[in-house]
Image (spheres, grey):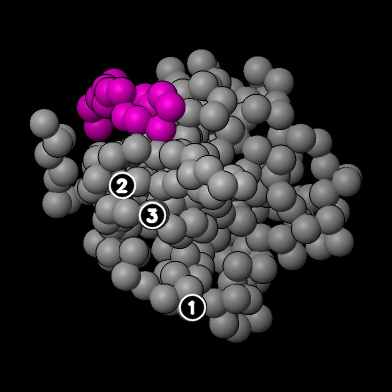
Amino acid sequence: MVPRVSSSSVVRLSRVLKTYRVGSTDVKALDDITLAIPANRFSIVIGASGSGKTTLLNLIGCIDTATDGAVEVCEEDVTRLSDDRLADFRSRHIGFIFQNFSLVPVLTAYENVEYPLILLGMTVASRRQHAMAMLEAVGLAEHAHRFPNELSGGQKQRVAIARALVKRPTLVLADEPTANLDSVTGASIIALMRRVQAELNTTFIFASHDAQLISHADDIFAIRDGALLEHRMETEQ
């Protein structure tokens, strides 16, 4: 039986298939995935390496497209959008946090956070107000003019979180955001994401195998070999 997909969900996938061509062989990365991810929650996709976690996040984040099936994000059927409209949709509605931080090394912390606002066409004054407010929110206002190589791992991830949230996206996707951090720093980053998620009513979706992060999940989606195994609701908001 196909799981029921709620119409109120921020993300809905229906019978999604994703295959990649490797030489003369089609490799199935996702197989008949149907799921619904609720809004304003901490949802985590778990599974072993190669299970399809990152592929799933890439489809939700409009970085990749499904081979078959429907992908709806923020009530938009993204499978029907052109490449240009996908790029515009992604820039307006989705923020990304990466395992390796992915900060631009020649830009300061402030400039890294400001950059998404430039793409949205904001004025200089508005960009400064929003970027500094977000750096203040993650506790890095005093480091605004430092470059990434002058920051610790935890500070880099805080800048990455500020950059993801500065445009007030509906959805933030994070692929192993605590993997390169020690447990104490990881705990502080999780607490920070939890706080801003509650304050901004943002939906966070993670791909992770970090037990510390999983323990904070509202919803857990387990996948193996590209197939959805189960969905567990851990806490109620």
Mark closer to the chain start, 2 or 3: 2
Q: From mark 3 to mark 1, how far is it between C-alphas?
A: 19 Å
Classify mark 1: residues with Cα within 10 Å, few (<14), some (14-19) or many (20+).
Answer: few
Classify mark 2: residues with Cα within 10 Å, few (<14), some (14-19) or many (20+).
Answer: many
- Label 3 residue SS: loop
Residue 55, x across and y down, in percent: 49, 43
- Dot 3 amino acid type: Thr
Query: Do the residues bearing badges 3 and 1 touch, measured as CB atoms within 8 Å?
Result: no
The residue to which callout 1 is attached is 84
Which of the two discs, 3 and 1, sits closer to the camera? 3
Identify the residue at image location x=65%, y=38%: 99
Q: Quadrant of the C terminus?
A: top left
Lateral position of residue 162 relative to residue 225, left or right: right
The residues colored magenta run 216-237
The residue to which callout 2 is attached is 16
- Dot 1 amino acid type: Asp
Residue 135, x across and y down, in percent: 64, 53
Magenta-drawn stretch contains 224? yes
Q: Nearer the viewer, residue 44 or 123?
A: 44
Residue 91, x across and y down, in percent: 50, 68
The residue to which callout 3 is attached is 67
Q: Name which quarter of the figure residue 150 lies in.
A: top right
- Label 2 residue SS: strand
Query: Do the residues bearing badges 2 and 3 touch, measured as CB atoms within 8 Å?
Result: no
Residue 19 sits above or below residue 63 on the image: above
